[in-house]
Image: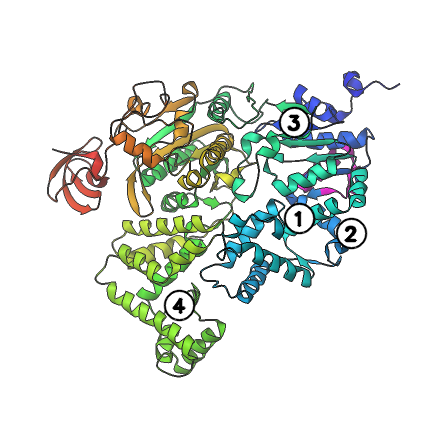
Amino acid sequence: MTQPLAHQPASAEPPYLRGLNEEQREAVLALDGPVLVLAGAGTGKTRVLTTRLAHLIASRKAWPSQILSVTFTNKAAREMIERTGALVGGMVEGMPWLGTFHSICAKILRRHAELVGLKPSFSILDVDDQLRLLKQVIEAARIDEKRWPARHLSSLIDSWKNRAMSPKDVPPGESFAYGNGKGAELYEAYQQRLKSLNAVDFGDLLLDVITILKTHPQVLQEYQDRFVYILVDEYQDTNVAQYLWLRLLAGQRRNICCVGDDDQSIYGWRGAEVDNILRFERDFPGAKIVRLERNYRSTPYILAAASGLIAANKSRLGKTLWTDAPEGDRVSVRGVWDAQEEARIVADDIEQKVRNREKLSHVAILVRASFQMRAFEERFVQLGIPYRVVGGPRFYERQEIRDALAYLRVIVQPDDDLAFERIFNKPKRGLGDAALQSVHKMARAMKVPLFAAARAMIETDELPARTRSALRDLVQSFIRWADQATALSHIELAEMVLDESGYTAMWQTDRSPEAPGRLENLNEFVQSMKEFDSLGGFLEHVSLVMEIEQSESTEKVTIMTLHGAKGLEFPTVFLPGWEEGVFPSQRTLDENGLQGLEEERRLAYVGLTRARETAKISYAANRSIHGRWQSSMPSRFIAELPADAITVESDPGMPYGGQSNLSTAPIFDSGYSSPGWQRAQARRGEVFGSRPAIEGQAELVATSDPAAETFRRGERVFHQKFGYGRVTALDGNKLTVNFDKAGEKRVIASYLARA
C-alpha cells in the first residue's frame, strides 16, 4: 500500500509541496471533511489555495470537473488557473467550475432556467439597464422619482437579494424604506418585468439558483454528487446568499475548504457578513481549523502594531502574525497642524526617498475617504511628484467636482458652451435631449453661445410651456448668481450655487453607496477655494492642475482608499487622517455602532499590513469637516497601538504638545460612543477612556472649545507654535494672525491665548 504523502520521505514528495511551511502543508494535505484556513495578511494564502487545488488533481482525489473552486474576481480566478497550471501542467484546462460566484451561478442557471420561468438565452442586465427598468416600474406605480430615486430602490433590492430575500420575504419595516411602504411591492413588480424581458440582474444569478436548489431536490442532488470538493477564497467577504448557496452544495459530502481572514472583513457596506466565517465550526461540526500566522511581507514592528490593534476586536477567531524578518523601523505616529501640513510632510518624506534612489512605485498613500486625496494631489502637482489615483479619477476629474466646476465656469464665462451643456439638465429639471437640441439649433441660427440662445428662447414660443419655464428658471438663476458674484465671496457663492441649483440636494436624496462620498468631495471642493483670492483665480488654478499630463512612467506614488488597497503591498505606506470622525468614520459609527467600529478597526489592520518595511500614521489637529473647521482628536486606534511598536514624531507646536503630551491625547474605550459626547465630557473636565495612548503618561483631560474664546481684530495674541502676533482678520473660529517671527498664518481660535 502506498504511504500517505505526509509520511513519505522529502525526496518522494511532489515538487509542489516543497518549500511550504508546516501550517501551509497542513492546510494543503487536509483534503477530506470541512476545513477553515485562517490566512493572515501576507501568509501565503494564494499559494495554499493553488497548491491544494494542484494536490487534489495530482493525487487523483478528484477530476478537475469534480472540483468547485470559487473566487470573488475574474482576476483571482485567472491567477488560480495560471498558478495551478504551473504546478501540475495542462490538466487544469478542464476545470469548468473554477470562477466567480456569479459566473458559476450563471452557468448553472442557464442549464435550469425554465425552473424559474426563464429561457436559457436570458440577458444579464448591467447597472444602467437595471436603473432604466426600475424607473419604468416607479413611474407605473405613480411614485415621484425625484423624491424616491431609482438608485435608492436599486440599493434596497440589491441588499435584499444579497440576503437571499424574495419579495415575499422582505420584512414590512424594510419595505417602508421606499415609497411609504411600497418597497416590497415595487420589488415584486420589478421581478415580474425582468421575467417578461427574459432577463436577470446580478443578484438574481445567486437568488434564482438558490430557489432552484431549494425547490428541486433532484437538481440539488445532481450538483452535490458532481462537486466532490469545494474550495472558497476570501470567505470572510461572502454575503448571506453566497453562504446559503455554499451550504446547500456542501451539505452532503462536507468536503469544503474555505480560506479567509476574519480580521480582513471590510466590506460590510456591500453585504459581506463576517459572521459567516466566525460560525464555520458551528455550521460544520468537527471542522479542522488551520491558522496561517507566519507573515512573509512585513517587519516585526509593523506586525506587532497591527496585531495589537486588532486584538481590541471582540468578534474574531484570533491569531497572531509573526515573522523572522529583520526588525526594521517602528511604526511612525505623527501629529500635524492640518491637512495641508500633512500633505507637505508626506511629500517631503517622498522627496527624501527619491534622493535616496528609492522608487516612487514603492510608495502608497492610503486614505479612509476620497476627499482626503485633494491635499496630496495639490502638493504633488506643485512639486512635480508623479502620482496615480487607483480606483477612481483624480480629485478635480470626479463627476461631482466637474459638475460643480461647470456651474462656476458659466457664471464667470457665460460663453462656455461645454460647461453649460454639462449642467443643462443636472440635476434633472425637465430639460431633456430635445430641449438641448432646440437650444443648439437656435445658437447656430443666431451664431451665439448656448447660454445666449437659451436667454433668447425663453422669450419665444419655440419650446413647450413646461420646458420653457424650466429653462427660464435656469437662465435667471445664472443671471442672479452672476450679480451676486460681486457682493459675495467666491466661497459663499459656490455654496449658494450648489444649494439653489439643487445639485447638493440631488446627492443628499441619492441612496447609492457612492452618494456620501460625493457629498464629502463637494464639501472638500468648497473648502479648497479658501486658498484663493477670487473665483477666477481658483478656476485658473484648477485648469492648470487638470492640464498637467500624467506621464506614462510606472514610477508614480500610488494614492488610493484603504478599501481599494486590500490584497496589495508596498514597501512604504503612509496612513493619513487617523482622527476621530474621519477614521473611524463617524458615519459608520452612527449607522452601525459597535459592529461598524470593529469593521473600521479591521480596515486599520488592513492598512497597516499593506506595508512591507515602513508604515507612517498621521493625524491632523484641525480639519475642515462639512465646511467647518474643527479641532480633531487623534483616532482611538492610535491609543490601541502597542507602545513598544511605535515611534511618536509629533510637532512641539501641536495642540496636544510634543511627544510627551501626544502620549496623553484623549483616549477611547474600544466600545462605541459618540465622539461628540466624548468632547462634551472632556470639556466638563471628566476623564474618559481606559488606558494611555502611547508610553503610558498622564492623561489629557480636555481640549478647548473653539467657541469658548472670542478675539478682536488688532488684538495681541500668543500661539504655542508660532509665538506672539496680532489678529488681522476673523473668519468664524479661524483667525488670520500676523506673527512676529512666523509671518501671517491662519489658526484656530481655541489654540490662541491673549498676550
Pair 2/3: label in front: 3
Q: Residue furthest front?
A: 172
Q: CA distance from mark 2 to mark 1?
A: 15 Å
Which is nearer the N-term, disc 2 or disc 3? 2
Q: Secondary structure at mark 2?
A: helix
- How busy is the neighbourhood of tag 1: few (under 14 within 10 Å), some, or many (20 plus)? many
Pair 2/1: label in front: 1
Compare residues 565 and 699 and report the one nearer the observer: 699
Which segment is the magenta one? Answer: 77-98
Q: Is residue 381 visible?
A: yes
Question: Which amino acid type corresponds to the residue marked 1 in the rendered image?
Answer: Leu
Up-down relation of residue 217 to residue 538 (above or below): above
- How busy is the neighbourhood of tag 2: few (under 14 within 10 Å), some, or many (20 plus)? few
Which is nearer the N-term, disc 4 or disc 3? 3
Q: Are marks 2 and 3 in contact (CB under 8 Å)?
A: no
User: Residue 63's spot in the image, x, y percent?
Assistant: 82, 36
Of the 4 image quadrants, the one containing the N terminus is top right
Q: Which residue is label 3 attached to?
A: 281
The verdict on residue 545 being magenta is: no
Q: Secondary structure at mark 3?
A: helix
Which is nearer the N-term, disc 1 or disc 3? 1
Q: Which mark is residue 111?
A: 2
Q: Is residue 563 left or right of residue 235?
A: left
Q: Which residue is label 4 attached to?
A: 420
Which is nearer the N-term, disc 1 or disc 4? 1
Compare residues 14 and 275 and report the one nearer the observer: 275
Q: CA distance from mark 4 to mark 3?
A: 60 Å
